[in-house]
Image: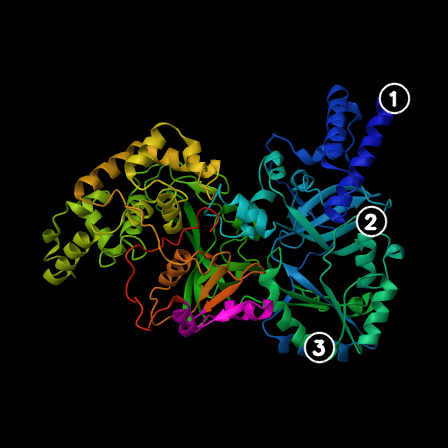
């Protein structure tokens, strides 16, 4: 067989294998067979570059060439969806839509994947480009990066010309595995957004992104299927991956079953009256999914009715999104300021027209990083929706309307706003490289003194800024040598407050080594991480420093929860001269730098169980005390309720975790029963905890 025919055959076999594995979930060849064919194709293409086709599977590997993202016009309107925040709003919309139609309707219910909206364009069955949503009419060309996603077909089963809308996302398990390299990434969506916009497609290829598609637009109207269910069926036949979690609502369950059978689609067959309970069911079990969803989408199934209903300037009238994240508010971006964190990380913050949200007035909201801004394509003057993520931290969710002033997407300045150092790009984030940058120094000190660290909370950020500006404290160890009496007479600082500062400093010297270690701000070493290191044999700073001096990665990786990447990060941090000097001075100040291992005689009554904790408690304040009691008795503790969780310790409040536990059949234990399980009389060891958890994500916890 000549090389041209062999390369074509290998391409066909590998593309079929990729579809079977990444789209259909039914592998047709072993990894060994796949790798052998792939390597053979690579060898042929390297020797004969002219034989490499645009649809070659080797395109998935990506390129090391840097690329920009030119703006390209969409051939279809890529609009947002109208929003609803209660099931009743969706029901009302459905009733209104049915009254507006002249024929019987059915509605398809789909999960709203919390990912990155992408439009894929194909000509004669071949992939030609991929664009971001942009402003709905023009998007950025990210084709080379999207080609690395194995669930995106490079050649379709039929030579059709069409545009396909989809959502690129990162599975939860992959995010948990990858965030070790960048623990400050907030969520899978942010990591996916950063991967889609990497300058080198080879870097995108290293992230296991995937995609669900949900709409198709054929250039030949005669080829367009009759309804949305048929569109999904045809997209699946062409080689796309569609979300199997679908439901159809019509006048009766029998009617829904008939429509699904005609389309050849498997889904829940329901009637209109089931909608509210179905949305409630999905809301409760969303945490058990393998990917993040931020809502549900209800769509008219009949395409002729869609055409009759039409569009507004911002959204189609034939679909609505039910959003989980509530409350939400709409406001205007007045400006963007840039903050510098303790690690030097740059965080842009939107300055907003004040708006009421969740019982408070919001004036600022996080924008995470430049890639997040680019994905939103946010400019000063834009109207935006703002949510409280987890009902706590305000964040800009979406651009609803572009500004009328002609402002373009905001770009973070290239220099630090505090010390004017030239910023450096590391992964998805910008960093100020100057470790003596005033904002970094103040941030490090504030982290060290925080309640969840050394618990010197009387010395808060304002006091630290004052001490720094007066030249009294320039690094963490200066807290232990500072002449606090010089504050007396300054506005707001009297003898009583100064005494509180001194007492807090002295009390902190009694904190155990694990707490001191967690408070130093070493990468990946939060409260749990410090405890893991101590329990794993690093019960003194001397042992940690020796392993660091020896570059002894294995000494760390012998601990099951620590991988090589984390080990290298810890070693590098402990080899840093500034950190070494800080540690030496803190030891001289009298802090605890060793910790005697306690051998627990407690019965391991929770061995093999996985517990989550929610709400507030009478005897466990803070509730990390309850986590420690569980762990001392063999339990593994987790931060969220999933299908693997066996028990939920529930105090007062704790709404979403309790709901998830009920939906998943997780055993719920109240405080009284928990005290009984521990064998306590009811007068348990409440009160303040000495060695608080830093709140950092560490070692996969």
Tell me the quarter of the picture where residue 450 sits: bottom left
The answer to whether residue 3 is above or below residue 284 is above
The answer to whether residue 99 is above or below residue 406 is below
Q: Which residues are magenta?
A: 650-677
Provide the residue designation for mark 2. Answer: 238
Counting from the top left corner in percent of width and height, residue 269 is at 78, 71
> Could you tell which of marks 2 and 3 lies nearer the N-terminus?
2
User: Is 656 contained in the magenta span?
Assistant: yes
* Prevailing secondary structure class for the magenta stretch in the rendered image: helix
Counting from the top left corner in percent of width and height, residue 393 is at 44, 61
Say which element carries label 2. helix
Q: Quadrant of the N terminus?
A: top right
> Could you tell which of marks 1 and 3 lies nearer the N-terminus?
1
Provide the residue designation for mark 1. Answer: 2
Counting from the top left corner in percent of width and height, residue 98 is at 76, 77
In this view of the protein, which residue sits in the foreground, 394 or 528?
528
Q: Nearer the viewer, mark 2 or mark 3?
A: 3
């Amino acid at each position: 067989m000549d090389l041209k025919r062999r390369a074509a055959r290998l391409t066909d076999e590998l593309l079929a294998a990729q579809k079977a594995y990444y789209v259909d979930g039914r592998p047709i060849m072993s990894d060994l067979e796949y790798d052998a064919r792939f390597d053979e194709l690579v060898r042929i293409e390297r020797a004969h570059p002219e034989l490499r086709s645009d649809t070659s599977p080797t395109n998935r590997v990506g390129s090391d060439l840097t690329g920009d993202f030119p703006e390209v016009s969409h051939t279809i309107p890529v609009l947002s969806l109208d929003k609803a925040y209660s099931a009743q709003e969706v029901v009302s919309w459905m009733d209104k839509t049915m009254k507006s139609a002249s024929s019987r309707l059915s509605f398809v219910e789909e999960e709203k994947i919390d990912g990155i909206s992408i439009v894929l364009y194909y000509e004669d069955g071949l992939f030609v480009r991929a664009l971001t949503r942009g402003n709905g009419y023009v998007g950025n060309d990210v084709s080379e990066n999207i080609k690395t996603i194995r669930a995106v077909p490079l050649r379709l089963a039929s030579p059709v010309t069409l545009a396909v809308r989809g959502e690129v996302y990162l599975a939860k398990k992959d995010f948990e595995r990858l965030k070790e390299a960048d623990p400050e990434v907030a969520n899978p969506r942010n990591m996916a957004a950063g991967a889609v916009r990497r300058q080198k497609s080879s870097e995108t290829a290293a992230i296991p992104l995937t995609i669900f598609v949900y709409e198709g637009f054929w250039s030949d109207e005669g080829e367009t299927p009759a309804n949305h269910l048929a569109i999904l069926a045809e997209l699946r036949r062409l080689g796309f991956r569609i979300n199997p979690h679908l439901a159809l609502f019509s006048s009766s369950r029998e009617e829904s079953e008939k429509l699904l059978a005609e389309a050849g689609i498997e889904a829940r067959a329901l009637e209109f009256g089931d909608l509210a309970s179905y949305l409630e069911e999905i809301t409760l079990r969303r945490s058990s999914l393998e990917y993040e969803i931020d809502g549900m989408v209800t769509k008219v199934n009949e395409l002729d009715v869609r055409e009759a209903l039409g569009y507004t300037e911002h959204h189609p009238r034939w679909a609505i999104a039910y959003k989980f994240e509530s409350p939400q508010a709409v406001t205007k971006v007045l400006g963007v300021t840039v903050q510098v964190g303790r690690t030097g990380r740059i965080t842009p913050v939107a300055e907003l027209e004040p708006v009421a949200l969740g019982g408070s007035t919001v004036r600022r909201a996080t924008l995470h990083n430049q890639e997040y801004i680019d994905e939103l394509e946010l400019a000063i003057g834009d109207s935006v929706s703002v949510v409280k993520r987890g009902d706590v931290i305000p964040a800009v969710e979406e651009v609803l309307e572009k500004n009328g002033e002609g402002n373009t997407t905001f770009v973070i300045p290239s220099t630090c706003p505090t010390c004017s150092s030239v910023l450096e790009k590391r992964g998805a984030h910008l960093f100020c490289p100057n470790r003596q940058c005033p904002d970094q120094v103040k941030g490090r000190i504030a982290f060290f003194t925080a309640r969840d660290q050394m618990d010197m909370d009387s010395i808060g950020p304002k006091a630290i800024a004052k001490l720094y500006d007066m030249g009294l404290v320039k690094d963490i160890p200066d807290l232990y040598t500072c002449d606090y009496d010089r504050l007396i007479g300054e506005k707001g600082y009297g003898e009583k407050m100064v005494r509180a500062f001194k007492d807090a400093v002295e009390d902190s010297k009694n904190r155990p080594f694990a707490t001191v270690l967690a408070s130093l701000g070493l990468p990946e070493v939060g409260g749990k991480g410090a405890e893991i290191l101590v329990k794993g044999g690093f019960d003194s700073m001397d042992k940690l420093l020796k392993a660091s001096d020896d570059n002894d990665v294995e000494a760390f990786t012998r601990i099951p929860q620590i991988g090589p990447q984390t080990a290298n990060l810890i070693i590098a941090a402990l080899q840093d001269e500034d950190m070494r000097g800080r540690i030496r001075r803190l030891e001289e100040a009298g802090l605890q730098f060793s910790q005697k291992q306690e051998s627990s005689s407690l019965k391991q009554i929770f061995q093999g169980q996985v517990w989550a904790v929610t709400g507030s408690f009478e005897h466990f304040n803070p509730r990390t005390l309850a986590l420690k009691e569980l762990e001392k008795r063999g339990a593994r503790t987790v931060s969220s309720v999933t299908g693997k969780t066996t028990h939920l310790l529930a105090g007062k409040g704790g709404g979403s975790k309790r709901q998830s536990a009920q939906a998943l059949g997780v055993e719920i234990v109240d405080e009284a029963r928990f005290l009984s399980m521990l064998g306590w009389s009811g007068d348990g060891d409440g009160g303040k905890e000495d060695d608080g958890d830093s709140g950092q994500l560490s070692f996969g916890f």
